[in-house]
Image: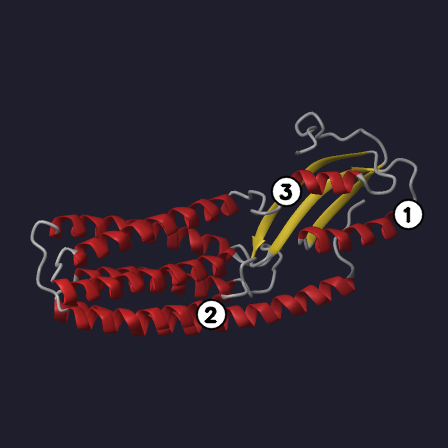
Amino acid sequence: MGAGHSHGADDAHAARDHHHGDAGVRAFAWVTLLNLAYTVLEAAYGFATNSLALLSDAVHNLGDVLGLALAWGAATIARRAPTERHTYGWRRATLLSPLANAIVLAGFSGALAWEAVRRFSAPPEVPGIPVMIVAGIGIAVNLGAAKFMHGGHDDLNRRGAFLHLVADAAVSAAAVLAGAGMLAFGWRWLDPLTALLVGAVVAFSAFGLLRDSFAAAMDAVPRGLDPAQVHDFLAAQPGVSAVHHVHIWSLGAGEIAMTAHLIRPGQVDHDAFLDAVVVELDARFGINHPTLQIEHGAGCEHDLHDRAPHH
């Protein structure tokens, strides 16, 4: 015997998913276009002033634009309805996009670091005021774009975009300080140093995103969710004598799935029991796509392969 949601719960989740999906697609659209416009502006001024700090940040932002475009596409694809072949729909597209984004960013960070080290031996003359103005615009653009992404931290796709935009604002702030140092003291080395710091920030953010997105793609338990607590909760339910085959994974875009086998010998109230447990799993753990199999005894053909309680 298995169970998922009641029809009322399904309708509520469908309405919530549609609302969040619309908001997510609009957010990605605005953020992508806004960052693309700023990237073109920053690259133009970087070439005009021969500033590696601006050019490196422009390359960084170009990587973000590509990543945001992937995330935008993934958010759009994730709204497609389930089919007979893709029974969960296309939600997992939002897990693959951050993985590609992280790989692109890692490549850019290496290129930026190489060029920055090369320029330390003979840093060119860079005017400080244009660097400060353009970087200051970057702070406003990135913080404004991050606001569109705020509130979607249960969605790895949006969380990746949000963290990148906040990091970009910090990088732009460093460029403003570098421009001020070059203007006030003539410290040419601040330009390649800033570019090197940009590469370090990109590498750090790319590593974290790569780790989380790879884990999600490999069906790891979502971060912040303790499977031992879920197991203990199920084991403490009325009539449950044992729990096994507990599997928890992300479907993408804030959707968490779970399967579990519950042994309830001699019980007859399974429908009411399942309805109550499903509601509580969502309320306590955010698990909104559970499938629970009720067994009356200990005989399960897969027990030899998966007998551990999954603590």
The answer to which quarter of the image holds residue 131 is: bottom left
Report helix, strand or loop for mark 2.
helix
Foreground of the two, 249 or 206: 206
Residue in the image at 41% along x and 72% along y: 144
Residue most toward the top? Answer: 304
Q: Alpha carbon of mark 2 to alpha carbon of mark 3: how far?
A: 29 Å
Report helix, strand or loop for mark 1.
loop
Compared across the picture, whether 42 is left or right of 240 comes to left
Residue in the image at 72% along x and 67% along y: 11
Residue 14 lies, in percent from the top left, at: 67, 66
Q: Mark 3: which amino acid? A: Asp
Foreground of the two, 90 or 284: 284
Q: Mark 3: give few (<14), some (14-19) or many (20+) Cα within 10 Å.
A: few
Q: Mark 1: give few (<14), some (14-19) or many (20+) Cα within 10 Å.
A: few
The residue that mark 3 highlights is 226
Q: Mark 2: which amino acid? A: Lys
> Quadrant location of the C terminus?
top right
> Quadrant location of the N terminus?
top right
The disc label shown at residue 269, or none = 1
